[in-house]
Amino acid sequence: MGKTRLEAFSDGVLAIIITIMVLELKVPHSSDLAVLQPLLPVFLSYLLSFIYIGIYWNNHHHMLHTVREVTGGILWANLHLLFWLSLIPFATGWLGENHFAAAPAALYGFVLLMAAVAYWILAHVIICAQGSGSLLKKAIGPDWKGYGSVLLYAAAMGLAFVSAWLACAIYVLVAILWLVPDTRIERVLRARGEQSGSAP
Amino acid sequence: MGKTRLEAFSDGVLAIIITIMVLELKVPHSSDLAVLQPLLPVFLSYLLSFIYIGIYWNNHHHMLHTVREVTGGILWANLHLLFWLSLIPFATGWLGENHFAAAPAALYGFVLLMAAVAYWILAHVIICAQGSGSLLKKAIGPDWKGYGSVLLYAAAMGLAFVSAWLACAIYVLVAILWLVPDTRIERVLRARGEQSGSAP
Amino acid sequence: MGKTRLEAFSDGVLAIIITIMVLELKVPHSSDLAVLQPLLPVFLSYLLSFIYIGIYWNNHHHMLHTVREVTGGILWANLHLLFWLSLIPFATGWLGENHFAAAPAALYGFVLLMAAVAYWILAHVIICAQGSGSLLKKAIGPDWKGYGSVLLYAAAMGLAFVSAWLACAIYVLVAILWLVPDTRIERVLRARGEQSGSAP
Amino acid sequence: MGKTRLEAFSDGVLAIIITIMVLELKVPHSSDLAVLQPLLPVFLSYLLSFIYIGIYWNNHHHMLHTVREVTGGILWANLHLLFWLSLIPFATGWLGENHFAAAPAALYGFVLLMAAVAYWILAHVIICAQGSGSLLKKAIGPDWKGYGSVLLYAAAMGLAFVSAWLACAIYVLVAILWLVPDTRIERVLRARGEQSGSAP
């Protein structure tokens, strides 16, 4: 079984998820510049989710580089990941519509948490299929970043009921964590002739 | 005629179908956690349909592995399958919106039934094109699962007017039937050097 | 310049057009079976447009088989075709919403007419790029079907104001014309080792 | 890292952006031909944006021809470009809904300006990755058209508050500038055996 269609299908779903979110930016009926102001939280939540989907697409891209043969387990673990990512537009819309209120901020963290867990499962299904000497296992390493993100999401979910802004700040922080050192990993792995991929 | 574009087009349509369904999860205007409760049936129907589209994508993927040359008949049988699958978001939305009422549950079964029939037609158009010694024919075998699913869908359509929950339980059962032994078939076929593919 | 991305982009746009149309089938709020009846014209117009997009995808697929090198002219002629096809969901929605009234039936014909003209332009840009001995030119031949369709669309646009049903019957007739002999052309061309492709 | 998935993902996002815009053409409830008249500005803004996305897709297609290896920087610069392009449907909808009013016309220019800047960044990230003797650098040259477009967008943003129609005329002018000489560049570059690509 080739991985071309798995990649094509995932690319399609991610491309639609990323573009569907922009539909939450509803076209205002007035032509006044001031009507854009209440859209600002919707825009910011869109920006954050766009970056998250970008990170997932980027890492998914790297992870599948290490895959030779697609098993039934990998297909379903991949669909499971896409399922949680497909809920991001809903969580984003609720967050933006309610100007970063407590419950939407907690739900946003929950969806990110489940997506991270689904990514972890996908990675481990691939590692099992590759057997000992798995390229992906070496690339991920002890995966501090993966486990740390899950802890931060969980913490943010609780903190959302204290301060939704604090929770959102944590989501931004995790996104930055995944954006910044990505090039470092890439460079290290290129030197070793390996490919990277770990869960945001 | 190559099959690359047939696969790409089908992947595109399936990716959009699976993602469009999530738009039925309308963003609530209140930020209260309690507003998520009435969304639960919508979420559950989305989950069920996501799994069904996943099963179809998975099996479609396997089935096209056995195809060398795409004929006009295969193109149209494939479009016919995509037509019925494209009605799943509508049936799902109606089922979720009305909290698993009788008529929506019956319609849901009808769309699944027609999709299964369309899948059967596609399989047999491919088998005819492959002639005697068809790889797909050997892989499908007597196709108990395919015929059984159609009977179960038909039964559920009738039972929906007695109990919509019973009908939905049958849809869940059929989905599980198709999820569970898929790996078994795959393993058997890999041993024989063949590829599988049958109608859910 | 390769044609892979041209095909991929066209497939993406056509897949989205075909799937967006189903959104016009709005989920009813009541769970009564009777609410499906007013949706019947929307469903029928969706079915007709699905078949038209299917025919276009099918013929586009064949036509690009004859293309070796993609020029700027081919890129823009292709985008021009996609532009008119992208208006089909709007024309379909208006036709279905108003239960096959006069003006929507005429507009539907206008969009089909412009799409046929755009297809003709694309075919001729490709023929020009291929120079004398163009494979596509031989495959299309005198193109009676292409010119006939355009005349039938134009006639239907006028007749729509007499009887919208007559106009729609003509659209169904043209679709059948393009569906039926397609396999014949395909078989003839395969015998000659050529590839077909003409405007619906 | 291959560029196939980068192209596939970009094609997917651009295909969805171009098709989502047509959803702003809301299906009217009356079947009178006269209801199409208020839709004219929506149609015209759709047409303009369709052409802009077409230009971007076309140039993106050319630019990636010069890329051999995709770095993390290229991935993110590409996502940054897609982010601004994904806001075009919103800007288009606002422009069309308000019949080319001042603030929407200025915002439209702002989104085009940011997309042009993002395109410029992507081009320069690619040029840096290619090192000295970059194929893309030679193809772009002094890039008068790129810088000129940015100046024209900025001017149009200011002029929008004097006359929204003047601003829109400038957007049309820039689109024509990018449409017309594209074939010239292509021909020149083909002669030199190079590939083109610059920011609209």
Image: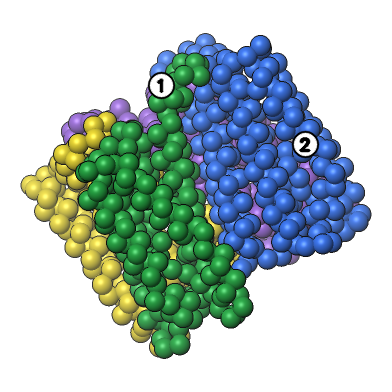
Chain colours: A yellow, B purple, C blue, D green
In the foreground, B167 or C194:
C194
Q: Where residue B196 sits: x, y (%)? A: 69, 54
Position of D71 compared to C102: left or right? Answer: left
Compared to B157, does A112 lie above or below?
Answer: below
Residue occupied by mark 2: C147
On what subunit does the disc labeled 2 rest? C
Circles 1 and 2 on the same subunit: no
Q: Could you tell me which residue is drawn at 40 percent across and 18 percent down?
A: C29
Quarter of the C terminus of chain B within the rendering = top right
In the foreground, B19 or A27:
A27
Query: In this orientation, does residue B109 appear?
Result: no
Query: In this orientation, does residue C192 appear?
Result: yes
Residue occupied by mark 1: B98
Q: Where residue B46 sits: x, y (%)? A: 43, 37
Which residue of the protein is positioned furthest toward the left in this rendering?
A: A162
Q: Residue D72: name its quadrant.
A: bottom left
Q: Where residue B37 sits: x, y (%)? A: 28, 30
Q: Could you tell me which residue is drawn at 18 percent across and 50 percent down?
A: A157
Q: Could you tell me which residue is drawn at 25 percent across and 62 percent down?
A: A175
Quarter of the N terminus of chain B within the rendering = bottom right
Q: CA distance from mark 1 to mark 2?
A: 49 Å
